[in-house]
Amino acid sequence: MKFDHIVGGIFVLTLFYLHKPVLVGVIMAFYLMYAENKINERLNKKIRIIKKRLKLIKKKLVVDKGHTDTKN
């Protein structure tokens, strides 16, 4: 991801230097959409992992509760 930022930055700065503001705007818009998509993918992955952990904890709690019930 860092490499993408570096390349994107150099490209945009080059276009600024060449005085092409419309092109810079279009490319920045596409790049922001791309970056937002990447961030969403990462967040979704983290959310999935957290949900799995919660399910495992819930199962463990249910199992533990079941064992305590059978002992009483």
Image (spheres, rainbow, N blue to C red):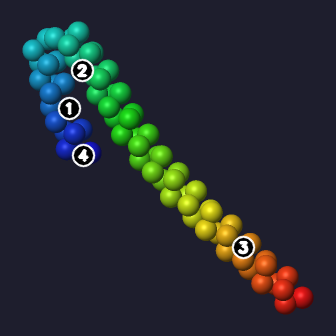
Mark positioned earlier in the residue sequence (1 or 4) = 4
| Distance between mark 3 and mark 4 Cα atoms | 41 Å
The residue closer to the viewer here, 48 or 67, is 67
Q: Which amino acid, by three-letter code, is at mark 1?
A: Gly
Tell me residue 44's x, y (percent): 48, 46
Q: Is residue 58 above or below residue 71?
A: above
| Distance between mark 1 and mark 3 Cα atoms | 50 Å
Find disc 2 in the rendering and name its residue: 27
**Side of 63 relative to 12 (left or right):** right
Tell me residue 20's x, y (percent): 16, 11
Mark positioned earlier in the residue sequence (1 or 2) = 1
Q: Which amino acid, by three-letter code, is at mark 2?
A: Ile
Q: In this view, does 67 lie above or below 57?
A: below
Question: Do callouts 1 and 4 mark residues in contact (Cβ within 8 Å)?
Answer: no
The residue closer to the viewer here, 20 or 49, is 49
Mark positioned earlier in the residue sequence (1 or 3) = 1
Which of the numbered marks, if any, corresponds to residue 9?
1
Q: Which amino acid, by three-letter code, is at mark 4?
A: Lys
Mark positioned earlier in the residue sequence (3 or 4) = 4
Instruction: Please name the residue shown 34% across and 35% down the image.
Output: 35
Q: Quadrant of the C terminus?
A: bottom right
Find disc 4 in the rendering and name its residue: 2
* Mark in the foreground, 3 or 4: 3
Local secondary structure at mark 1: helix
Question: Do callouts 3 and 4 mark residues in contact (Cβ within 8 Å)?
Answer: no
Q: Which amino acid, by three-letter code, is at mark 3?
A: Leu
* Mark in the foreground, 2 or 3: 3
Find disc 3 in the rendering and name its residue: 61
Q: Is residue 46 above or below residue 39?
A: below
